[in-house]
Amino acid sequence: QVHLVESGGGLVQAGGSLRLSCAASGNIFDPYVMGWYRQAPGKQREVVATLTGGGRTDYAVSVKGRFTISRDNAENTVYLQMNSLKPEDTAVYYCNALRTTYPHYNYWGQGTQVTVSS
């Protein structure tokens, strides 16, 4: 069983920055893909950024160049640095761990609210 705990959300003005953290129980970076997702009110959950065990990163087009996903292996923590925030970034942000080998466990954190005011 893997437990994910997000932190770092809050209220920020447009143009500001926040750093989200996802603390994971145990070493799950390989063979897991770690990801950040978000869900705005009335919308479906969408992927924001992913990070493979080998270090490959991918970003949604809407956040590319503004957000950075990274990890600290020693702390078993994944981060999402969010810069130049926009009101449309407002959402609940969720951490995800997807095992890439069988069995394909899929774990979610409880979410952290990010609100960007205009």
Image (spheres, rainbow, N blue to C red):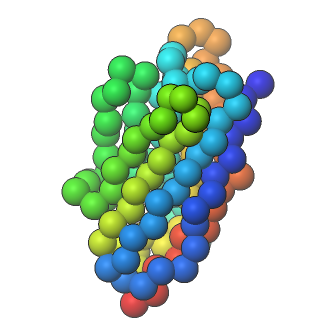
Which of 87 and 65 lies nearest the eye of the viewer? 65
Is 40 situated above or below 69? below
What residue lies at 34% left-to-right and 27% top-to-bottom? 55
What residue lies at 49% left-to-right and 73% top-to-bottom? 90
| Camera sees residue 89 | yes
Is 101 situated above or below 58? above
Q: Where is residue 111 in the image (x, y as percent from the top left)?
A: 65, 56
Which of 47 and 115 lies nearest the eye of the viewer? 115
Is 83 situated above or below 26? below
Left or right of 31? Residue 54 is left
Q: Position of residue 95 (x, y in %)?
A: 58, 46
| Camera sees residue 62 | no
Give the mark count: 0
Q: Where is residue 20 in the image (x, y as percent from the top left)?
A: 52, 57
What residue lies at 45% left-to-right and 37% top-to-bottom? 71
Q: Specify the farthest residue to the bottom.
A: 118
Q: Position of residue 93 (x, y in %)?
A: 56, 58
Quick one: quadrant of the N terminus? top right
Q: Specify the farthest residue to the front.
A: 74
Which of 66 and 107 lies nearest the eye of the viewer? 66
Left or right of 111? Residue 37 is left
Left or right of 48? Residue 42 is right
Left or right of 23? Residue 62 is left
Q: Specify the farthest residue to the left.
A: 65
What residue lies at 65% left-to-right and 36% top-to-bottom? 24
Which of 101 and 2 lies nearest the eye of the viewer? 2
Q: Specify the farthest residue to the top.
A: 102
Residue 53 lies in what quarter of the image?
Answer: top left
